[in-house]
Image (cartoon, grey):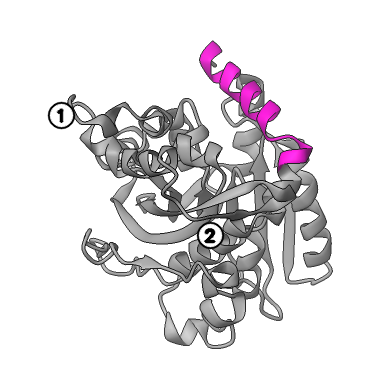
């Protein structure tokens, strides 16, 4: 394990402390994005080969109403009805009896939204969360305690760095060829060596299992090197998100991790309220320019922190383990 990877792990643990976890749970943008992540994962049709993805034009519409709580989205009105889900999506991956891993699971805000789709009498489903942060896993474990009152769900977490050399025998014994699906949301742009992380995650999939990577997508990243005179390519966001290019993600999934049915594409755009620190490290040069010029709408957010209204793009990268 490289020193850079170790340093990145330590930095992430230091940043994602108990105070940050508390704010994360309370932040409206995270609740909104959790709903949208699960909505578009549940509705993603991977039955057709190759998987049909949205074109840039199809995913260009910005969803949500910033003047409504959670952008106007809710679990009840926005997610498929669990009672009729398998009738509407007969080829769905997410179903009772499956084994699901939420990698870099955080507080479990996303994880718990899958539970109704994995619950059916007489069928045992397994949900595992892996994260490096103890503070975040406290919230995950509180959710698991409530969910595990149902005999149909076994939900538990592990505080692991999956590239830790000392853990490799244990990880292989626990998880090799184990999961039907792995999801990872809003974490890859924090991972120093995501190519090797992806390669390891691929070993956790059973033959035919799917890996879904969901993350912020900065369109400026694709233009890096194409036009050095473009101020957007010099933004801090590009440095922060520099690894998340469509071609690089596809290469990581197909060539490094040896997955098939690989594709990466913007899945949707959404209005969210975020503090300046987020905008400066995640958003395009156009948006960071508006922030510096005072052109963004603002409001008071968590702990009276000033939040600004921005539109963000989300990319879904997917791959399947060969049967």
Task: Measuring from the top left, give residue 102's x and y in whole percent.
Answer: 59, 51
Residue 17 within the segment the image draws in magenta: yes
Q: In the image, is residue 255 above or below residue 209?
A: above
Classify 10 Å Cα crowding around label 1: few (below 14), some (14-19), many (20 and above): few
Query: Which quadrant of the view contains residue 131?
Result: top right
Residue carrying label 1: 227
Secondary-structure class at tag 1 = loop
Residue carrying label 2: 33
- Say whether residue 35 is left or right of residue 281: right
Secondary-structure class at tag 2 = helix
Q: Residue at x 71, y 40 (%)?
A: 20
Classify 10 Å Cα crowding around label 2: few (below 14), some (14-19), many (20 and above): many
Quarter of the image for the N terminus: give it: top right
Q: In the image, is residue 88 above or below residue 295?
A: below
Task: Measuring from the top left, give residue 61's x and y in whole percent.
Answer: 31, 66
For the record, the magenta segment spans 3-20
């Amino acid at each position: 394990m490289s020193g850079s990877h170790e340093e990145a792990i330590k930095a992430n643990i230091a940043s994602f402390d108990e105070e940050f976890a508390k704010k994360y749970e309370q932040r409206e943008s995270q609740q909104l994005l959790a709903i949208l992540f699960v909505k578009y994962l549940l509705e993603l049709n991977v039955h057709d080969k190759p998987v049909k993805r949205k074109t840039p034009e199809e995913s260009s519409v910005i969803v949500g109403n910033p003047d409504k709580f959670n952008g106007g989205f809710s679990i009840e009105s926005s997610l498929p009805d669990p009672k009729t889900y398998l009738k509407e999506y007969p080829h769905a991956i997410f179903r009772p009896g499956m084994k699901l891993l939420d990698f870099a699971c955080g507080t479990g805000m996303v994880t718990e939204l899958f539970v109704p789709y994995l619950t059916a009498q007489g069928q045992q489903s397994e949900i595992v969360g892996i994260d490096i942060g103890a503070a975040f896993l406290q919230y995950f474990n509180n959710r698991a305690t409530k969910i595990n009152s149902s005999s149909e769900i076994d939900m538990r977490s592990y505080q692991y760095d999956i590239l830790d050399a000392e853990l490799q025998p244990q990880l292989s014994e626990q998880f090799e060829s184990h999961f039907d699906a792995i999801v990872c949301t809003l974490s890859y742009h924090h991972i120093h060596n995501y190519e090797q992380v992806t390669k390891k995650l691929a070993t956790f999939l059973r033959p035919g299992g799917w890996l879904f990577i969901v993350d912020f997508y900065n369109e400026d990243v694709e233009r890096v090197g194409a036009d050095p005179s473009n101020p957007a390519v010099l933004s801090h966001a590009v440095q922060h998100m520099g690894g998340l290019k469509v071609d690089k993600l596809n290469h990581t999934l197909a060539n490094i991790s040896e997955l098939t049915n690989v594709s990466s594409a913007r899945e949707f755009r959404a209005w969210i309220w975020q503090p300046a620190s987020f905008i400066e490290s995640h958003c395009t040069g156009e948006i960071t320019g508006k922030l510096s010029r005072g052109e963004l709408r603002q409001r008071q957010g968590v702990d009276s922190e000033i939040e600004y209204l921005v539109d963000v793009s989300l990319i879904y990268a997917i791959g399947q383990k060969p049967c």
